[in-house]
Image (cartoon, rainbow, N blue to C red):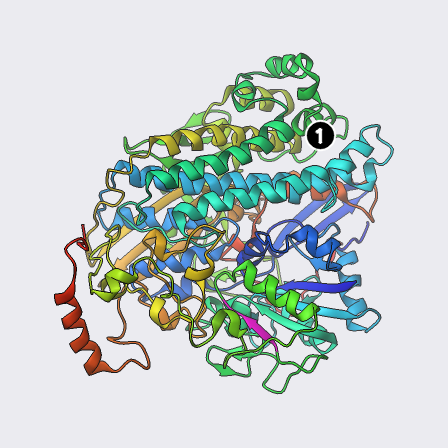
Amino acid sequence: MVNVVWMQGATDNGCLVSFLNMQQPDVYQAIEKLGVSISYQNTINPTSGKDVIATLEKYIAGEEQLDVLIIEGAIPRGPNGTGMACFIGPKSFAQWISELAPQAHYVLAVGTCAAFGNIPAAEPNPTDATGVQWHKTEMGGFLGKEYRSKAGLPVINISGCPAHPDWVAQTLVAVLLGKNVELDKYNRPKDFFGEEITVHDGCPRNEYYAFKVAAEKFGDKGCLYMNLGCKGPHTHSDCNRRLWNRQSSLTRCGIPCHGCTNPDFPEGSMPFFQRRRLVVEGWKVVPYIIGSGFMKLAKPERLKNE
Amino acid sequence: MAEIDLSPITRIEGHLDFKINVEEGKVTDAKAIGALFRGFEIILKGRDPLDALVITPRICGVCPTSHNDASARALDDALNASIPENGYLMRSILLGVENLMSHAAHTYVLFGPDLANKKYEKHEAYPELARRFAPITGTSYKGAVFARIKLDEIFAIFGGKHPHTTFVPGGAPVRPQLSDITKALSIFMQVQDFLENVTLGCSIERWLENRSLKDVQKWLEEDERHANSDLGLFIRYGPELGLDKLGRGPGNFLSYGVYAQADGKNWLPAGFYDGKHHTLDQSKIEEHIKYSWYTGYEGGRHPMEGITEPYYEEGEKYTWAKCPRYDGKPAEVGPLARMIIDKDPLVLDLAKEYGPCVYTRVLARLHEAVRLAAKIKEWLLEIDPAKPFFGSYERPSNVEGIGLTEAARGALGHWVRIRDGKIDNYQVITPTAWNVSPKDSNDVHGPIEQAVIGTPVEDEDNPIEVQHVIRSYDPCIACTVHVITPRKSYKLKVV
């Protein structure tokens, strides 16, 4: 039996809604074959009120082993340091997390809110919100740099707005099987967020990109990077390899990538529909510009915008 | 006087706490209190207007597409957009699929499990209700979990992913091929299987022939598959469980209208009903703050001129939710309101017989879901992949826009004021703000508060009756953008 507690803070519940689309394993296999027991998840919980409080207090007192603590949502520390911009029953969300985290064997911060702060932490950060162990691109956040779960690990960040159900499910399964999950520089599983992966990979508009055929307006066939602000080339996640809901991705549906897995989302991506930088970090500017010019000349006839 | 702590209320979307007074087994006063503030409207100030298209859907991950639609419609209005027919169809399909999914999730995952509550253990239908509706293990619950995954797949074919696609002013950014549409239709048939075999016990078309309670009675008797379907079971046993006696709201209903069409009309119309049908006039929408922790004005204020100036004091104010009113009146929003405003004959007959109670509300939601399922199929077949999906919009610097639509759980409005090309003021009134609103300037309770007051509480350790009432409105607190709570000393107790 694996005890899982899923806490929701300053969140829109989108990561839970996304998680419910999990298919490998599906919810029933997770329960029946992997022995997952979800002790508390507000949206699906059978009981309300004091039963919920009693369950959480049992874990805080160490009477029951808390195997996995999943946190969805940013942690507001305001207003005025009270944390009460978000509360569950008698305690602020911040208070619950500070009491539950020391008892947890693994902590998963699911979604960009929990991982890095996301929209609630966007300027002017009205509720003084932060991520569980990171504040945007800086380690620290709510629990602080030094925090380690009982398994000796930092908080495992699974960013995304929302997080892909597979990112959560496969991390959970790996942890339950006792596997070592390799993390990137933002403590995210490398499998999904590694340096060598971008949203650009697997985008069917890649050929347009290569020959610099740009979409001028929404609904055009070209690449969304040049004029519509696609953040795909500098966003490290596998959306266009893995696909969403087993079907598609934003860029496949004509919507520029918003960079929602990035630690500096949303501010680092706004304005969302404008190109913010000429090149992506790491690209060599002069060769890029020269190369682009040549690629335009090399463009085959069939790659017209309309 | 009993002291029961109802917090947190689970199986709703997001953070809701609830404070009630109970005397002699009956609720005498009620206060609905949201428990989350993120400050979206503050964060949007000074941003590029198009940024609202990405930020506002993240108000709610349960009904993000209604925010997609409202933000796109507000910008359509402000930026003088021209939208081709395919653009309207695409938006309606995406919003319709999400609303259908939300209704399925509400019926089976949020509300349904209460039918397997221990209160009903002695009822003859209990073993069957528990077998179907118990959380996780119920057979229908399980079926619904997989049906909603299928609906999300249809959504992703056109929207890229669910939750959180992005709508744009001027139509839709997607260019689906015929094979995308046929694939969506094929997945839809799998959802239809669940709806017809498990929920209805008959075809969608057969159910939609029911236009009165008399028709429904005939339908029940016609075939035992009808009577033994989930809907048949609910229709037969709902009144026996007392659900027709619970949760009578104020009897005023508001719909902004939804599923905009190229002819300028909505498939489900806008309107206000307070015993009589009225045309919607959005200038009659106001937000009050007498009992909310805000300051800066008295009485009501239209959202385009909305002020959000927090002000906490210990006194008569008891919530950070603002209090929307229409023409000075509280109004119920959601499927029941939409069906009444649409003059749906079956729902009008239901409301006449049972009043605006838990039973009527749940049946109106299911009936709307069946109507919507039929309509989604029509919309999919109407798409012409050879024609454009996106038209155009302009970029004026100083302009205002209003985007009105309907989420699964009711009327959603976005009001945007653009100055020097940036967002100067962005105000959102969510459906749940209407339903969980506190008392207004005239001391009139909000709809859920009114519906909870007078509710009998049989067992104080299991106040399931109050939970039936709250859940029947399908509240979504993630949506309540204005809601915040003040400080640690605040006790969530039932006095």
Question: Which residues fall within the magenta stretch?
Answer: A155-159
Front residue of B398/B310: it is B398
Q: Main secondary structure of the magenta part?
A: strand
Q: Residue furthest bottom?
A: A146
Q: Is residue B233 left or right of residue A304?
A: right
* Residue B310 higher or lower than A181, as above or below: above
The residue at the point 23 percent across, 57 percent down is: A222
Q: Quadrant of residue A289?
A: bottom left
* Residue A227 higher or lower than B433, as above or below: below
Q: Is residue B60 left or right of residue A57?
A: left
Return the x and y of residue A115 as percentages of the image width and height. Answer: 54, 72
**Residue pointed to by mark 1:** B245
Residue A193 visible at all: yes
The residue at the point 66 percent across, 63 percent down is: A6
Return the x and y of residue A154 as percentages of the image width and height. Answer: 62, 80
* Residue A189 higher or lower than B134, as above or below: below
Name the image quarter holding the C terminus of chain B. bottom right
Count of labels in the image: 1
Asked if residue B177 is among those painted magenta in the image, a careful observer would answer: no
Q: Is residue B80 left or right of residue A153?
A: left
The residue at the point 26 percent across, 47 percent down is: B170
- Please tell me whether mark 1 sits on a helix, a strand or a loop: loop
* Residue B254 higher or lower than A233, as above or below: above
Disc 1: which chain? B
Front residue of A222/A73: it is A222
The residue at the point 29 percent across, 65 percent down is: A229
Residue type indicated by callout 1:
Lys
Q: Quadrant of residue A38?
A: bottom right
Asked if residue A156 is among those painted magenta in the image, a careful observer would answer: yes
Q: Is residue A66 left or right of residue B382?
A: right
